[in-house]
Structures are given as structure tokens and as C-alpha cells.
Amino acid sequence: MTPDDTKPVNFTVKAPVYLQIGDTKADTAHSGVCVVDVNLPFGKPVNIEEVTFKNYYTAYVTVRLLRRNPEQEAPAKWCTALRDLPLMDNPHTERGSQDYYTIHRTQMQVEPDHVVCVRLILRQPSLAWLTFSLEDIKIFPHTEPDPEKEVSDWLSDLTLIDQHPDLEGLPDPQTVSSSIQQMWALTEVMQTNQTTASIGRFDVDGCYDISLLSLT
Amino acid sequence: MQQGNGIELSLTIAQIIQRLRGSHLHSQIERQAKECLHQPDVKLESLKEDVRSFLKTSGWERKLQNAVYRELQLPPRHPPAPPEHLKEPLAYMRKAQASWEKRVLKSLNSMSTELGVPLAHMRPAAEQKELTNKWNEMGTDEPDLSRFRPVYAPKDFLEVLIGLRNPNHDSSEDISARSHWGLIQVPLNVRDIPHLREAYSELNLTSGQMGIDDHALIHPAVLCTHSLFCLHLSCVVVMEEDSAAAQQYSRQGCPTGLRADLWALILNATNQPQDVMHYEQLKAGVIQHNLLVDNLIYKVSYIYLTPPLLFSQVLLCFSRDTAVLEHFKYNSATPPKSYIQGEIISVIPFHGFSMYVAPLCFLYNEPSKLYNVFREMYIRYFFRLHSISSHPSGILSLCLQFERLLQTHLPQLFYHLRQIGVQPLRLAFKWMVRAFSGYLSTDQLLLLWDRILGYDSLEVVAVLAAAVFAFRAENLMEVTSLASAEAVLADLSTLKVMPLIQVFLFATAM
């Protein structure tokens, strides 16, 4: 899950291109395929964490990535990260048509690292709609998780944190508190059973000298 | 919504925890957990396990499970999606709902001006005292209501639904002949009989149903065993206080004596002291202020021969319950509110919505319990019958489903009715918008509502509407005018709903 404070990457989106068969610009035929290219900032390839967008009547989306490996001098290569992800249950009906979606890196078939360009291929085979597209496309970069601040609030509320603090020679707090609990129970018992019998002190002839006590 | 399973699960868990945190149940469980520390068998070394097992044996874990189950019914929130999208994903539907609400409010305001009655005013002290004394006799003598008319009629709402269009929908070509047969022009996802058979498999012809299979015609020995088994099972469910089990059980109908408890369990409508207090506060509000809509409520309360006082009490309180407003976060409808001295004082109910309460008066005699159950049923189901949304239980989907079922499985009947100038939806709409309340006999209605709760969906209402047409198909094929079609369908009070639904779903030739 992306933390809320991660900023999306700035990029430019080229105008969507609706593919047609043949040369003539036929107005009557609807195009069922559209290509949207997202160019990431030049010279700064991105490791993608997730891609979010809002659908507008697109039935299926395919995600292709142009990756350039920084170590090798090989030219950048295109690969398919996700093929024909269904966004609408049924291309002819409304469900999913205006929903928000997230594609996480774990859902992609390749590692989306060192990405220079993202190409989204949209398909809408149904004739029911006048147009289709994706809106509000955002790409979030992958950040290495911060080791100290990994566990989110709610998780730590659910589980007991089994940390053993550095005791420096002191007894274990758990055993101390359970013996205190027992002592408290004992005092309760004593309070209820008060007697007049003397407790019986360990003294030797009225004296509490420690070296003498050890003799008893 | 496509996401990795693990991510979606942790998102759902986080959301549920956030919703339950700070709730009354949360503080109750915390208090219970603290109090159990005094118990001798709770030891410090195994504190976590001991507290958990205490909560389990004392029934609090079950209550928490029920609350989580309730939360799971609500839609999950996807992070980038704004709240209005959560309520209703389609922008043009949100717009249509907003303009419909404006229209209703305008109508209410103009009625107020026309009659010279303010939308809300404080009652004078003497009137308040009188109402307090008469609270338990309410419904027996009424003020002059002849000047008040309903804010709108179902047919007005139907016209709005018929006029709905998706701006992105291409209606230039004859894409689907079916869309030109019926009235609803919005392409929503609705289920056809094969899918319905799967989803409603418990209604199969071979499964026993309460209300059919405990009938006297069956051999006594078989009858006894079956009934006893069902009764025993339902008692166990009630005693275990398990919402999910109660819901599953309700799919085959509830025994009359246990229905009230089972419904309360399914809806997780508890009757805790704070619920009773809340009800008393609402009652105080009724006594203090007189709202214009109160008169509309009085007007409708005579259709049912139920204890009228309970009925009026519940409705008047409901119209003031601003906690209901909180529910509307999950619904794109924003009910009109009225103000008295800067304080939001009411949810204005819509016409005929008193029909949703009446059947419940037969089940519950304690006002605050009845009130809680009604409120839960309203905010889960009934509000969808008079708001514009793309939800599968919304009235729009039900209308479309009804039309599609008829077109697919009774095409000759549909065609014949169109030939004589009758649109079947215009005949069935008034049944569906009231979930058949006021049209069926009460025991049959309650059996239908058992299934609404059991399947957590209003789809059965559309299925029943189509099933009624199927049942009266022969007569309808012979009518030659709208008036005679209406006459054939005028009286539904003798119908037995479950056999009709079962035959329509499971015995229709495919």
C-alpha cells in the first residue's frame, strides 16, 4: 500500500490516439482501441510502485513498459506488464465504467523498474458507448520502506510487541509483576484473617544483627 | 476493483477497524476486558489469551463478529475515490438524484407557502403538554388533513427514471431491440434466470420453505419432523445470537414466532439502554416541534389496520432522527432537511414510505425496538426504492430487471401488452416501489421480506413482480385495454408469494 504522503511522479501524457483500420478518417465507425502514452521525465527512469486511474467506459487495459537498464548500454526495450485487465464486468453495461482502479507492482508480470515510458492500450469492443478513456492517471514511485517506521498504527494495536528491553541485571518485569500480584493477594488474605497471635520475629535475644541471624 | 488479494484484505481490515473504533461496542468491550481482570482465572503471564477466552465465553466476541459482519455489508472505500463516488460511481446518476431532491424540496416548500403552514415550528407549551398525555392514543383523532396532499406520487418518480439517459450512451443505432421495448434506457447489470437460480438456490423446488411445506396437506409425521427441525434450528440460531447464521436461515423463511428475533439479529438492531434513550429523545423532539411532514404521516396511517399509535410514533420519530443522516454517507441521496433555530431537525420522509413501517408493527410491540429495526431496514434497503442509483438493489435496477425478465421469458405477453398500448412497468412499478407493502396479505409480505433480509437484496421484489405477470399471463393475454389490464392485476391479496417465485425461477422453460 502506498503511504498517503507519497507524491505521484510528474509526467506528460500525450493525447490519446484512437486506432482506425485503413487510411480514411471514417467518422461513422467507432474505434475500439485507444493508445495512451505516458512519458516519464527525461533522464530520470522510475521504479513504479503503483499506477492509479479513473475509468471512463474502458473495458480492458493492457500496460506496456519501456525499460532502460542503467548498467547495460543496451537500448530500451518494451515489455508487457499486464495484458487485458478487465475494468468492466460486461463491456455493454455500466458496472465498473466509472470506477477508480489501482495497479500495484505485484500485479505486474515484470518488474516495473527503470521505466522510461508507460503505454496504456485501452479496448472497448462495445458499440454502446460514444467514447472511452482513462482519467486522472497517476504513477507512484517505489520507495524503499523505512526500517524504523514500518509497522503502521493499527497493526501495532492488534499485536503485542514482544520486545525484550535491556534489563541490565534487573529481574524480568513479567515475573516481578506476577509475584507482586501474588503478594497483593496474600495481603488481602491477611487483612481478612487478622489474628492476635504474634508473628514471631527472627531475633536472637532481642538483637537483629545480621551475622547473628545467620546462625538460626 | 482489481488489486492483489493481500493488499485488498489489509485495506478492508484497516477500514473496518477505523469504523468500529470509538463505537459504543468498542467501549463496552474495553470495559468488559478491564473488569474481567479481577477474575482469578485471568493471569498476567497469559493475559492476552485469558482476556480473549473470557470475551469468547461471555458472548462479547460474538457481538464483535456481528458488528464486523455488518460492516462487511458496506462497500469498501478505495483510496483515490472521493466519498460521493463511494455512494454512487456514475456521475450522471448523482446529478439526476440531486435534481430530483431539489424538485421534492421545492414541492414541499411551495406546499408550505400555499397552505400558510411553516415547514417547522415550535409547539406552544399547552399543545406540548396535551401531546405528551395523548402520546399513547395518537392516531385515534386527527386534525383536518384534507388540505394536505402527498409531496409526489410514485408515477412522478417513474417518469424521472424513464427519462434518465447516460450522456455517453450511443442511442443512434438500433443496438439493442430490447431497449426499445421497455421504458428503462440505462444499461445496468441485471441478472437473468440462470444466474438467479444459482444465487437463490435455497428457493429451489426441492428445498422446504416456511409457509409452504409446513402446510396441513402434508402428512402429519413428515410435517412434524420438518417443522420441528426448522423450529429447533431457528431457536439455536437465536440463542447463539449469530447474525450470519440468522441471515442464512432466513432464506427459507422464518417461523412466525421467531421472526421478530431473527430479523433483529440479522440487522444487528440491539435494544440497549442507549437505543431506548435515543428513542425517548426523538419522542421529545416530536412533542416539541410540529413539522409539516407530520401531517403527511398522519394522512397515510390509516391504510393498514395495525395499531395506529405505534405506527405514527415510529414515523414521527424517524423523521427527526438525524442519526439517519449519518447513514446517507453511503447513499448519494441527500434528504432535505429543515432547520429550527439553526439546528437540523429532520429527515423529510417521502410519500408512501410509511408503508415500509406498517408490516413491522405486527412483529414488534415495543416502540424503541420497533423503531430500531425499522431504521435499520430503511437505511439498508428501503431508501434504495426511492432514490436514483446504479446499485443492484436500487429501484432503477429492479425496474430494468423486471422488464428484461418479462421480455426474455414472456415475450408474447410483453408484445401483446405493447400492442394495446400498455407498458408492463407502469403496472408493476407501484408494487416494487413499496416492496409490495399494501398489496399482499401481511403474512405473505413478511415471507417476502424474510428473503430480502436473507439474501441482502431487493432483487426478489423484481422477480416476484415478473412472477405475478407470469401467473396471470393467460388473463392478460385476453385484455384489450389498460383499464382491463389494471383490473386483472388489481387484487394481489390472495397470492402465495413463495410458490410463485419458485415456479418462475426454477420451472420456467429455458
Image (tube, coloured by chain):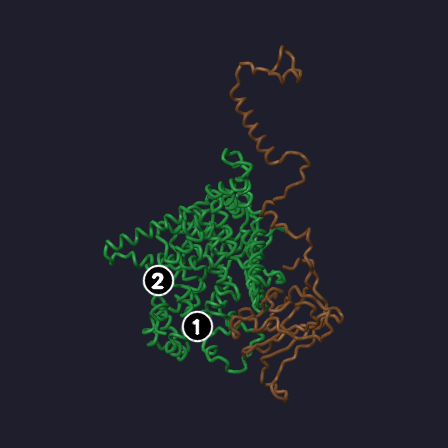
Chain colours: A brown, B green
**Amino acid carrying mark 2 in the image:** Met
Place of residue B429 in the rendered image (x, y in percent of width and height, measured from the top left): 44, 67
Q: Residue at x 52, y 16 (%)?
A: A195
Q: Is residue B57 visible?
A: yes
The circle drawn on residue B403 is 1
Foreground disc of the pair 1, 2: 2
Quadrant where the C terminus of chain A is found in the figure: top right
Q: Is residue B350 above or below residue B183?
A: above
Place of residue A37 in the rendered image (x, y in percent of width and height, measured from the top left): 67, 75
**Amino acid carrying mark 1 in the image:** Glu
Q: Is residue B110 visible?
A: no
The circle drawn on residue B498 is 2
Q: Is residue B312 above or below residue B496?
A: above
* Marked residue chain, label 1: B
Q: Residue furthest front?
A: A215
* Marked residue chain, label 2: B
Q: Taking A78 as reference, is B509 left or right?
A: left
Q: Earlier in the sequence, mark 1 or mark 2?
A: 1
Q: Residues within 10 Å of mark 2 (few under 14, many from 20)?
A: many
Q: What SS does tag 1 mark? A: helix
Which of these two is toward me, B204 or B254?
B204
Quadrant where the N terminus of chain A is found in the figure: bottom right
Q: Is residue B323 above or below residue A138?
A: above
Place of residue B342 in the rendered image (x, y in percent of width and height, measured from the top left): 63, 51
Q: Residue furthest top?
A: A205
Q: Are callouts 1 and 2 both on one chain?
A: yes
Q: Residues within 10 Å of mark 1 (few under 14, many from 20)?
A: many
Q: How many numbered markers are drawn? A: 2
Q: What SS does tag 2 mark? A: helix
